[in-house]
Image (cartoon, grey):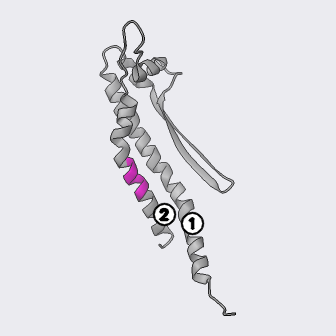
Amino acid sequence: MADFDFSEVTQLAADLGDVAAETVNNLGPALEFTSFRIKQGAARKVSSRRHFGQAAAAIDYELNGFSGFGAAVVQAEIGYDKHRPAGELGNLVEFGAPGSPNALSPGSELVSTLHEEEADFVRGIERAIADAHRGAGL
């Protein structure tokens, strides 16, 4: 039986492992930047609403992460902080109250701003991955 040299394959596997770990490290800043932009954009839109402008100050985001058991998760929650003044109005502002007597229309400011920032977020993710590849020498 012939002997095969798998050292290059083994090194590539190790490098790809480094890429995965570094990608997770790079995703945090990309996610935070986009979350901040969504917060700002949605707050700007909500502040122009006649009856709900004060709810803009309650828009915030929170980053969460977990790493363990061979997996890593980075996520952001963007929305109305119910503990801030006017934060409890967030559901009415975003989703409206279509079945109510005054038929309040949904504003969808958070959702529309999320869609506006989507392309920039994708570019940030691509950059994070490219930086991780460069850092691993690939």
Among the 4 quarters of the image, the one containing residue 2: bottom right
Read off the residue under disc 2: 132
Q: Crowdedness of circle 1 by 10 Å Cα count: few (<14), some, many (20+)?
A: some
Range shown magenta: 121-126
Residue sitting at x 30%, y 15%: 50
Amino acid at the residue labelled 2:
Ala
Q: Which mark is residue 87?
A: none
Q: Residue at x 36, y 39 (%)?
A: 115
33 with respect to 23 (left or right): left
Residue at the extreme top: 101
Residue 23, percent from left and from top: 51, 58
> Tag 2: Cα neighbours inside 10 Å, few (<14), some, or many (≥20)?
many
Does 79 sit above or below residue 67? above
Residue 138 location in percent, x, y?
A: 47, 72
69 in relation to 12, above or below: above
Is residue 122 part of the magenta span, yes or no?
A: yes
* Secondary structure mostly seen in the magenta stretch: helix
Horizontally, residue 90 falls left or right of residue 3, namely: left
Quadrant (top left/top right/bottom left/bottom right) for the N terminus: bottom right
To which residue does mark 1 refer? 18
> Splitting the image into 4 quarters, where does residue 110 fall?
top left
Secondary structure found at label 1: helix
Q: Are marks 2 and 1 in contact (CB under 8 Å)?
A: yes
Query: In this rendering, is residue 59 above or below 14?
Result: above
Question: What residue is at 46 percent from the left and 60 percent from the top?
Answer: 129
Residue lying farthest to the front in this orientation? 1
Three-letter code, disc 1: Asp
State how far apart marks 2 and 1 are (Cα): 8 Å
Question: Where does the image place residue 123, in percent across and percent down from the top left?
Answer: 37, 53
